Image: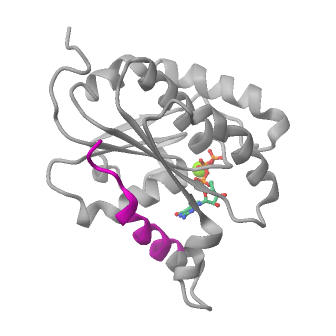
Amino acid sequence: MTDINEADQGAVLIGIGGCGKSMVQSWLPRLPEGVRCMAMERDKREFVTSKLFEYRIILTGVKSKSSAVEYAESVQKEVQTSLTKHLPTLDQQLAGSNPVILVAGLGGVIGTWGSQLLCNHLTAREKSVVTMLTMPFGFERERIKVAEAALPGFDGAAHRVLCFNDYLIKHSPDGTSMEDAFNIMNDKTFDLIPFYE
Ligand SMILES: Nc1nc2c(ncn2[C@@H]2O[C@H](COP(=O)(O)OP(=O)(O)OP(=O)(O)O)[C@@H](O)[C@H]2O)c(=O)[nH]1
Ligand SMILES: [Mg+2]
């Protein structure tokens, strides 16, 4: 069996949930050679094109849509149950890759709990984990509560980057559509990616 820390095959980016996936997608044209991209979502239909990611984890068992903080524990369990089935294959996919960069927006279900569970799983296996997390907008009050509740659960990561949508949005001129604004914001975060741990 392959030792998951055996060889150094370079960085892997894993876009988790809607925000994580969009960010990784927006960086694709600028990625250094050899960086691999993967993604995790709740549903196949969440991928406009699957070809962008060389490996996808589909958490089909996750039905919960709520990101209210009072349901956090049960939602987290639901994600854990679904994710556990994928871990042996994922570990093989990540064999020799270093660092593993988890990219997610906090406040929703998959991005928050999927990235946290993966962070803890990989850290326990002594992988070098980088988290690139984005805080929701201030007006997304319930999501901010979930994000704040989740943050301490990422303590195991070797390197952490925390972005704030309230700051990222300042890069978009007034009147920009939401879609364009996200594209500009996501593009701006490229320079923050620590490819080498
Ligand atoms: N910067 C940026 N932020 C985003 C983007 N998409 C969503 N967000 C932010 O990220 C937060 C989480 O949203 P998603 O990533 O869509 O949530 P999710 O993890 O897919 O959650 P579920 O759909 O509930 O499973 C949102 O509340 C937004 O603040 C994006 O493309 N760029
Ligand atoms: Mg989503």
| Residue 38 x %, y % | 34, 43
Which quadrant would residue 127 be assigned to in this image? top left
The residue closer to the viewer here, 104 or 25, is 104
The residue closer to the viewer here, 52 or 5, is 5
| In this picture, residue 30 sits left or right of residue 80 | left
| In this picture, residue 78 sits left or right of residue 132 | right
Outermost residue on the top side: it is 1
| Residue 159 x %, y % | 43, 42
Point 45% across, 53% down: residue: 21
| Residue 7 x %, y % | 15, 26
Q: Main secondary structure of the magenta part?
A: helix
| Quadrant, the C terminus | top left
Q: How is the image coloured?
A: one colour
The residue closer to the viewer here, 108 or 125, is 125
Q: In the rendered structure, does residue 149 fall within the stretch colored magenta?
A: no
Which quadrant would residue 175 be assigned to in this image? bottom right
**Count of number-bearing discs:** 0
Point 24% across, 21% down: residue: 5
| Residue 180 x %, y % | 50, 79
Which quadrant would residue 1 be assigned to in this image? top left
Magenta range: 182-197
Point 57% across, 87% down: residue: 176
Point 68% across, 49% down: residue: 107
